[in-house]
Amino acid sequence: MHIKRHRLASLIVVLAVSLASMPMYAGSGASRGNNADRFIARPEYISRDKAASIAKNATGGRVLSVERKGRQYRVKVLLKGERVRTLRIDARTGKLK
């Protein structure tokens, strides 16, 4: 039992030291290698399904397509009377534009 605890404690120390020595920077990828951008926080976006739900609730129509272009979703909705409307929804906040 004592040996297992010792091994577990050693493993925790090794993991902590390994994680502490990892570079955590958000600088230019040119001077630090090609994968430096993996440490930069990415903005959170709402899902395509959430954008479709927002459009459906706002219009009462049937969602035909959902496409993200940069920071917004473009959602095409079929309305009563066979009319198609395109809604723009902010991809971060979910607000209609």
Image: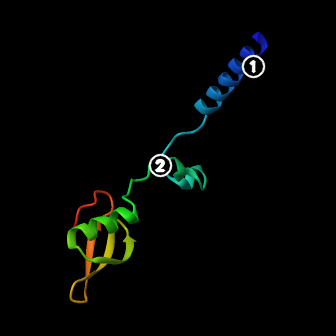
First reached walking from the N terminus: tag 1 or tag 2: 1
Q: Seen in the image, is 31 located left or right of residue 84?
A: right
The answer to whether 60 is drawn above or below residue 79 in the figure is above
x and y, in percent, of residue 65 in the image: 38, 77
Q: Residue at x 68, y 18 (%)?
A: 9
The colouring scheme, among rainbow, by chain, secondary structure or one colour, is rainbow
The answer to whether 33 is drawn above or below residue 72 in the figure is above
Give the labeled residue for mark 2: 40
Write down the quadrant of residue 55 in the picture. Answer: bottom left
Q: Residue at x 62, y 27 (%)?
A: 16
The local secondary structure at tag 2 comes to: loop
Of 61 and 41, nearer the camera is 61
The numbered mark at residue 7 is 1
Q: Residues within 10 Å of mark 1 (few under 14, many from 20)?
A: few
* Amino acid beneath label 1: Arg
* Real-space Cα separation, disc 1 to disc 2, in angstroms: 34 Å
Farthest-out residue, right: 3
Of 53 and 32, nearer the camera is 53
Count of number-bearing discs = 2
x and y, in percent, of residue 51 in the image: 33, 65
Which quarter shows the C terminus?
bottom left
* Amino acid beneath label 2: Ile
Q: Residues within 10 Å of mark 2 (few under 14, many from 20)?
A: few
Which quarter shows the N terminus?
top right
Q: Residue at x 55, y 56 (%)?
A: 30
Write down the quadrant of residue 13 in the picture. Answer: top right
Q: Seen in the image, is 35 located left or right of residue 4?
A: left
Q: Residue at x 37, y 71 (%)?
A: 69
Asked if the residue under mark 2 is in contact with the one under mark 1, i.e. CB atoms within 8 Å, the reply is no
